[in-house]
Amino acid sequence: MRANVRTVAFVLAGGVALAGCATRGQLREAIQAQEAALQAERAERIAADERLAQDLAQLRSDIEALRREFDARIAAVEKGIQFALPVHFDFDRAEIRPQDMAALDRFVEVVSKHYPGSVVTVEGFADPAGSAAYNKRLSKRRAEAVRAYLIDKGIQAQVRAVGMGEERLVVPGAAADAPGAELNRRVVFVIESPKVDNSIVMIGSAAE
C-alpha cells in the first residue's frame, strides 16, 4: 500500500514539474513574441519619421523653387498657407495670360504632390476702376477662370473661387493704366489642409 502511495506521489510530482516547464516555455515564447512586436513597431516608427523628414525636405525645396523661379510670396495664415503668384490680368479682362501659365502649372504640381485632397481657395481681385459691384463680379470671373485652369490641369484638390473685388489693394488707388494697377488685378491662393505645416513658411515674407 505504501509503495502504491509513493508511486502516485512520484507521478503527481512529475506532472507538476512538466506543467511548470510547459508554463515557463509558454511564458518565454510570449515574451519573445512581445519583444519582436515592439521591435517591429519601433522600426516602423523610425521609417515613418524618416519618410516624413524626406517629405518635408522636398516640400521646402519645392516652396523655395516657387519663390526663386516665380517670385512667389508665401505666408502662413489662420486657415493654412497663402500663395501669391505673379498671375495678373489685363485691364477689364478675366482671361489667363499665356505668360502666367507656367506659374500656375508649377502650383498644380506642388499642391497635387504635397497637399492632395486639400481645399484651395482662389481669391480674385480687381483694381479700383469702375463700380464696387462691377469689380466684385470681375474679380469673381478671374477667380473662376483660374479655378477652371487648375482643374483642367488635374490638380488633386478641391478648388473654389471667390471674388474679393477691390479689397486689399497692393497699390492703393492704382487703376486702369496707372503704375502698379496690374498688381491689383491678381489672384491669391489659400491652401487649407490638415497636412499643412506652417514651419516651412518663412514668417515675415508677406503674401501680398
Image (spheres, helix red, strand yellow):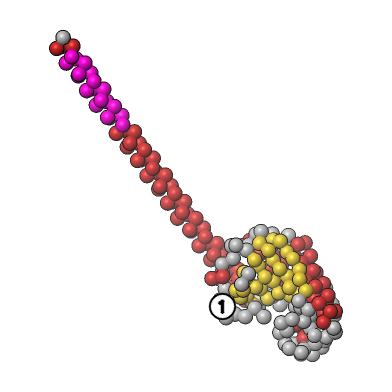
Q: Residues within 10 Å of mark 1 (few under 14, many from 20)?
A: few
Residue at far top of view: 1
Q: Which residue is mark 1?
A: 203
Residue at image position (36%, 38%) is: 30
* The N terminus: image quadrant: top left
Q: Residue at x 77, y 86 (%)?
A: 181
Residue 17: within the magenta?
yes
Q: Nearer the viewer, residue 88 or 26?
A: 26
Of helix, strand and loop, which one carries label 1? loop
Where is residue 194 drawn, in percent x and y? 60, 62
Q: Residue 77 at x, y = what percent?
A: 62, 74
Q: Which residues are magenta?
A: 5-23
**Does the image show residue 101?**
no
Q: Main secondary structure of the magenta part?
A: helix
Query: Would residue 189 appear left or right of 94 to someone viewing this image?
Result: left
- Relative to 43, does residue 151 appear above or below in the rendering? below
What is the quadrant of residue 19 in the picture?
A: top left
Can you tell which quarter of the image residue 208 is in?
bottom right
The amino acid type, in three-letter code, at marker 1 is: Ile
Q: Could you tell me residue 17's position as x and y percent?
A: 24, 26
Q: Residue at x 23, y 20 (%)?
A: 12
Left or right of residue 97, residue 170 in this image: left
Residue 89 occupies quadrant: bottom right
Residue 52 image offset from top left, x and y in percent: 52, 60
Residue positioned 48% across, 58% down in the render: 49
Relative horizontal placement of residue 202, taking residue 12 as reference (left or right):
right
